[in-house]
Amino acid sequence: MTVAFALVTSLMWGLADFGGGLLTRRVPALTVVVVSQSLAAVALGAVVLATSGWQEIGSQLWFAVAAGVVGPIGLLAFYRALALGPMGVVSPLAALGAVSVPVGVGLALGERPGGAQTLGILVAVTGVVLACGPGTGGTPVARRTLLLTVFAALGIGAVMALIEHASVTMTGLFLALFVQRLCNVAVGGAALLRQTRRGRPALPPDGRAGLWASLPALALVGLADVAANGTYMVAAQSGPVTIAAVLASLYPVITALAARGWLSERLRPVQTAGVGLAVMGTLLLATG
């Protein structure tokens, strides 16, 4: 179950990142975050009401609150790092840093992967870095970009480490995800309000009509992110976090493959090799 759900997590996160990346070409990034998470919150709220999930209210929801506050901050730092620096450097560093937080927590709590699993972790992480297409042209990276990347990685990793403790039941899972989305919207909405007061646009160039036209895609991005958080929670609770976190971090591979299929972007040889290593690492983790 750990392997299966973690792989579904990487699929959903990869598709969400790909869709979000496409949307930010015509809609401000912060608006994409707030609207997509708001639509996901509405869907989750209906599920919570239908399943009487509010009965699962307890102290464990503070983990969901923390994940909901940290999540949008890390995501915005990631977007800004991508805007300021070379994507081929920012993406692999963020993915590698993000996985280190939950893996470190798992090791601190006493988890010890076997020899084959340790090898699988190393191979899979190497594959993720290569699949992102690390820059080889010597492009300088400003200190601010590196700091934003590290901050984003820690934020994303913290969400992965926190959300697994937010629930132990299926109805509680929906409630935890709902609370997380509400906090995402609150933090992101406050940042969006501050941005508009500084004169930055919150709507796309074609105004409200463009935003309305983007709502279906924004809903898909929000729901894919919700699904990823939910499946990761199940994966981390059903097996070693060290394995779940590494497999979930394969999402950059999914994003690269989606760009290849949808946008006809060619994978460089180093990226193709990275995809192959990621698959090999997955097999080692699954059989280890």
Image (cartoon, rainbow, N blue to C red):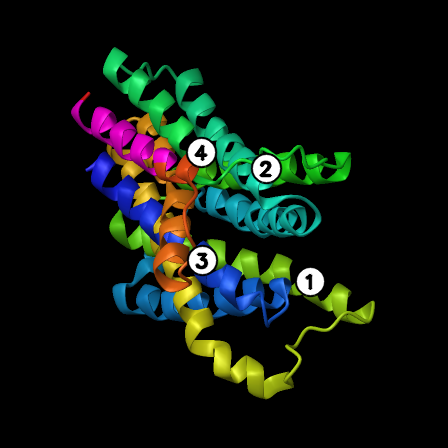
CA gap between label 2 and label 1 equals: 30 Å
Q: Residue at x 44, y 57 (%)?
A: 18
Q: Which residue is mark 2?
A: 89
Q: Which of marks 3 and 4 precedes in the sequence?
A: 3
**Labels 4 and 2: the sequence-earlier one:** 2
Residue annotated with mark 1: 190
Q: Can you give x and y, in whole percent of width and height, for residue 264 in the image?
A: 40, 60
Q: Which residue is labeled 4 in the image?
A: 130
SS class of the residue under badge 1?
Answer: helix
Q: Which residue is mark 3?
A: 18
Relative image position of residue 281 (x, y in whole percent): 29, 28
Label 4 or label 1, whichever comes before in sequence order: 4
Determine whether 241 is above or below 14 in the image.
above
- The span shown in magenta is 273-287
Tag 4: amino acid: Leu
> How far separated are the C-alphas under marks 4 and 1?
36 Å
Question: Does the residue at mark 4 contact the one at mark 3 (Cβ under 8 Å)?
Answer: no
